Image (tube, rainbow, N blue to C red):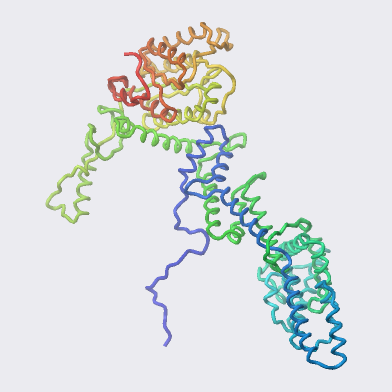
Amino acid sequence: MTDRPDPHRARYGRFTGGPDPLAAPVDLAEALDAIGQDVMAGYSPERAMREFLRRGSPERTGLDDLARQVAARRRDLLERHQLDGTMQEVRELLDRAVLAERKQLARDLDDDARFAELQIESLPPSTAAAVSELSDYPWRSREAREAYEKIKDLLGRELLEQRFQGMKQALENASDEDRAAVDAMLRDLNDLLAAHRRGEDTAEQFEQFMDQHGDFFPENPRSIDELLDALAQRAAAAQRMRNSMTPEQRAELDALASQAFGSPELMQSLAELDDNLRSLRPGEDWGGSEGFEGEQGLGLGDGTGVLQDLADLDALSEQLSQSYGGARMEDLDLDRLARQLGEEAAVDARTLQQLEKALRETGYLKKGSDGQLRLSPKAMRQLGKALLRDVAQRMSGRQGQRDLRHAGAAGERSGATREWAFGDTEPWDVTRTVTNAVVRTLSEGGSARAGVRLDIRDVEVTETEARTQACVALLVDTSFSMAMDGRWVPMKRTALALHTLITSRFRGDALQLIGFGRHAEVMEIEQLTALDAMWAKGTNLHHALLLANRHFRKHPNAQPVLLIVTDGEPTSHLEPDGEVYFSYPPHPLTVAYAVRELDNAGRLGAQTTFFRLGEDPGLARFIDSMARRVDGRVVAPELDDLGAAVVGSYLGSRSPGGGGPGGHYGDWFGGRGFWVGD
């Protein structure tokens, strides 16, 4: 009675049918954050993505790490090996044959034995010459004859191994019938390649060849082109191995080759094969060479394999560099990488491929009208959320962190709920609170029939948004000094964090981003984050305030909020004819124009905050005096805290108390900032 498999039993193992369908999706958050940093530093999104893939991260191996492994593997092959392995093996077999023959001759007492001794003693020092001279020698020792025959057998198998991988082992202890099969295969192969050169071959001819001789080709090529590629790559590696030998080694090898299998016809067939392959695949590297410096000898077949490995490593090095036109991660040959560096390296490379594919296909990168990649709005939102989380961490433990989630106690319901936290004054969401209590009671083994007891963990409150609408103008300095002093990226991160907060949590507020260098302009967030560093001198605060006041006048029913990030005094202004006037040190007229527009903002009711970057005493005195004119305030944050400072000031302006010293954010900055006014 035979055992039948139990249909109710299951076997579990590693998935082998391609990429694991149950594998976790690639996490793009880390990649987007790194790419966003580089984009805001002035890189194109394409270059920023390439840089991230190249350098990797603490949790992910990058292309540079894989390239270093490839270089180390290549260096190890060259430093460990040398190319005289076959010659050493032939020399050992020859010495064994000569020693055994001498012993036999010493036991023989006839005159022919003495003549044979003279012949053995007068062998030339060259291994190849000695082997050739002994080709017709009548061996008396059976052991000596077998050792000499092994030389011819070894040479034949090594020469075939150079062209056909695995042939050396397959033909070990081969019979005359096996060797005849090799000869027949070589004849038919040369006939097939010659017909292909003339354009006269057919698919049927190839199929017939594979039916007869397919056992010689474990690669199982499906077409003559695949067969050609495999043969040409191996033959080119054999030629590079020959090129890498010294002239003396090449001369010895040529002299020995005719002794292979004791068949000069073999060398003729291999020479014809090489000629066909060179003609049909001239693009292979037939002229290269390598410098081997090690002590471990390589035979002809193994040496050809090492040369193929070196070619694989060179190809991988180029693929990993991604420095050629149109380079994509999908160009990486994962099978080749696994062969050379192991499965773990292939898994790392596959992860990078999936990462690039996900970035391109999930909508985070898109092509603009000029064909260049751009960060999509989806990517901008994701980056903004990450920046807001960073802001929240910097404001954690203080009122500011909760203010990221709600805009005041007496506000309009946003439709969202959250777990109650100490200090919350929002109304409870009764339905969700009772539901949480029922679920908790049942999960703890209790029964809801007798009623449930509320626990503080069950309470959820309704999030609210303030009823007051704000009209916000964020003025960011884009002058030469911002780029020179490392303030470029923090400025962009700040703008993106504020933009994300307003567009996601305070959609009723109107935000305008204004960059001001030699002149000012209103910018979309995508334009600002991708802005290259401006090397033109000038800080046109006057023009920026003109644009901000125009924005305030378009929203007469909203509370104006003016946020100014700068590291220098105004050095340019707009003339009545629209031309830019620049002067350093600042011209009194430039300062007067800026003061006039700031006063206009004050008359419009703008709550003004200056964010002073740098320690210039003259700048500090100037901004202090400007803030006093409009009852504004000054914050001097560290660069890392700039985003938290701006977001905190904005949230403070929307809360009761107005965000000044008596409001929620009056003491947030501690020793890193100070108040002016009030």
Q: Nearer the viewer, residue 637 or 115?
A: 115
Q: Quadrant of the C terminus?
A: top left
Q: Nearer the viewer, residue 1 or 77?
A: 77
Q: Quadrant of the N terminus?
A: bottom left
The location of residue 176, given as percent across then percent down, is: 76, 84
The location of residue 45, given as percent across then percent down, is: 56, 37
The location of residue 441, given as percent across then percent down, is: 19, 51
The answer to whether residue 448 is left or right of residue 553 is: left
Residue at x 53%, y 16% (from the top left corner): 539
Residue at x 66%, y 69% (from the top left corner): 220
Q: Is residue 486 visible?
A: yes
Determine the image quadrant of residue 325. Answer: top right
Q: Nearer the viewer, residue 247 or 419?
A: 247
Q: Nearer the viewer, residue 88 or 624?
A: 88
Determine the image quadrant of residue 52. Answer: top right
Question: Which residue is most to the left?
Answer: 450
Residue at x 66%, y 68% (from the top left corner): 219
The answer to whether residue 442 is left or right of residue 70 is: left
Q: Is residue 315 above or below residue 608?
A: below
Q: Is residue 145 visible?
A: no
The answer to whether residue 102 is left or right of residue 374 is: right
Q: Is residue 126 above or below residue 670?
A: below
